[in-house]
Amino acid sequence: MTTKTVSEWIESLKDNDLSARITAAVALGDTGEEAKAAVPALIEALKDQESEVRAMAALALGKFGEEAKAAVPALMEALKDQNVRVRCSAATALGGIGVEAVPALSVALRDQDRRVRIDAVRAVGQIGADAVPLLLDALKDDEADVRGIAVEALGRIGTAAKAAVPALIEALKDEADYSRSWRGYPHKVSGAASYALSQIDPEAAGRGDVPVEQTRLRP
């Protein structure tokens, strides 16, 4: 990729050439914190007429973390985009920004497209304890991948997710297969729930219908 300054990449976001605008958005996201001056320009790029530019601009904003919290309203608007990839990218970016994005991610978790909800629940899982209420909502989703990834996230949060114990005990009955977020091969939601319980509340994991062998599974 051609070496340019941050200012030059920002200027390229306005280029008439589509590939130049896409390359600029990707480059700014990959540059890191030194490119945080690009946040306003990337927010503007969320309005680009080409969906690929909008998607790449969203992903770039997510890489700036809290430095891009000013982008939350624009990313929330991007969750209404007609293009599914743009909505997925906006959801992913919001997870990178952190707790400021929780209200926006609650919208993404209600998207009609399963792909957006899956990316949204992955994003929510990055936020930590502040996202537990959203993850509990995700356990009610019709899509097994959403439920399973939510269960995994609760397990990673650990003891700070104790409010999820009753819902996770209920999830022990969920025999649906889902694609495990860390490898992508099928696994049962119930197995992930038993492991999550062992991380959140070992006593709960040892009660009732939680088989010992299941608590050894690492989603």
Image (cartoon, grey):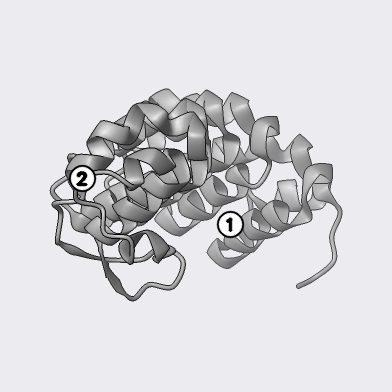
Outermost bottom residue: 185
Q: Which mark is residue 112?
A: none
Q: Are marks 2 and 1 in contact (CB under 8 Å)?
A: no
Left or right of residue 11: residue 116: left
Counting every numbered tag in the picture gives 2
Q: Quadrant of the N terminus?
A: bottom right
Left or right of residue 99: residue 36: right
Q: Residue placed at 28% from the left, 61% from the top?
A: 191
Q: Residue placed at 54% from the left, 24% from the top?
A: 100
Mark 1: few/some/many CA within 10 Å (<14, 14-19, 20+): few
Q: Nearer the viewer, residue 107 or 10?
A: 107
Among numbered discs 2 and 1, the one appearing first in the sequence: 1
Q: Which residue is mark 2?
A: 208
Secondary structure under badge 2? loop
User: In which quadrant of the rendered view does residue 90 lie?
Assistant: top left
Q: Which residue is mark 1?
A: 16
The location of residue 120, given as percent across then percent down, is 37, 45
